[in-house]
Image (cartoon, helix red, strand yellow):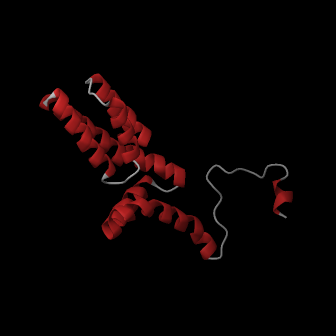
Amino acid sequence: MAAIHAVVIGITLWVMDVPLLAPLVILVFLAAFVPLVGILVAGTLAVAVTLGTKGWVAALVLVAVFILENQLESHLLQPIVVGRMVRIHPLAIILVLAVGAAIAGIAGAIVAVPITAALVRAWPYLQGRAPAPPAGAGADQPGEASQRR
């Protein structure tokens, strides 16, 4: 997700010929790892540099690109990609992030998905039953049965 942010904003800054392209792209990439406020802070700095060097029209274009890209990433790409990685439904990812942020702010949003993924995987063991096999798991491969004994 951070790479997507950096590439989209980097291309936008490059097309508009904004100075300090490399530092701003690196800042956007690193800021994407901080939920909720990371992109806001990096975007504010990028817009300020654009406003100071290219004028208010270019700054408004950059703000529009930031808003569009952030909304698409937050509501479409992140739940799908993260959901596949931790094998949790994308809607559950959105809800867990919202609950984590409401309960504990930024720190809650950072740890909400990993805690939920750990609980979902541990729940069958805590109940004393075997977990369901992963989706797409077929018959035992040769030698698997002997390894389980």
Query: Residue 57 lies in what quarter of the image?
Result: top left
On the image, the x and y values in percent for residue 133 come to 65, 58
Classify 87 as above or below 81.
Answer: below
Q: Position of residue 47 (x, y in %)?
A: 22, 38
Q: How many discs mark residues in the rendered view?
A: 0
* Residue 102 shown left or right of residue 26 in the figure: left
**Looking at the picture, does residue 39 appear above or below residue 101?**
above
Q: Residue at x 59, y 69 (%)?
A: 122
Residue 79 x, y percent position in the rendering: 42, 50
Residue at horizontal 61%, vertical 52%? 135
User: Toward the viewer: 82 or 132?
Assistant: 82
Point out the residue furthest to the left here: 56
The N terminus, quarter of image: top left
Q: Is residue 112 left or right of residue 134?
A: left
Q: Nearer the viewer, residue 73 or 46?
A: 46
| Residue drawn at (30%, 44%) of the image | 42
Question: Observer-nearest residue: 96 or 124?
Answer: 96
The reply to whether residue 122 is in sight is yes
Which of 131 and 138 lies nearest the eye of the viewer?
131
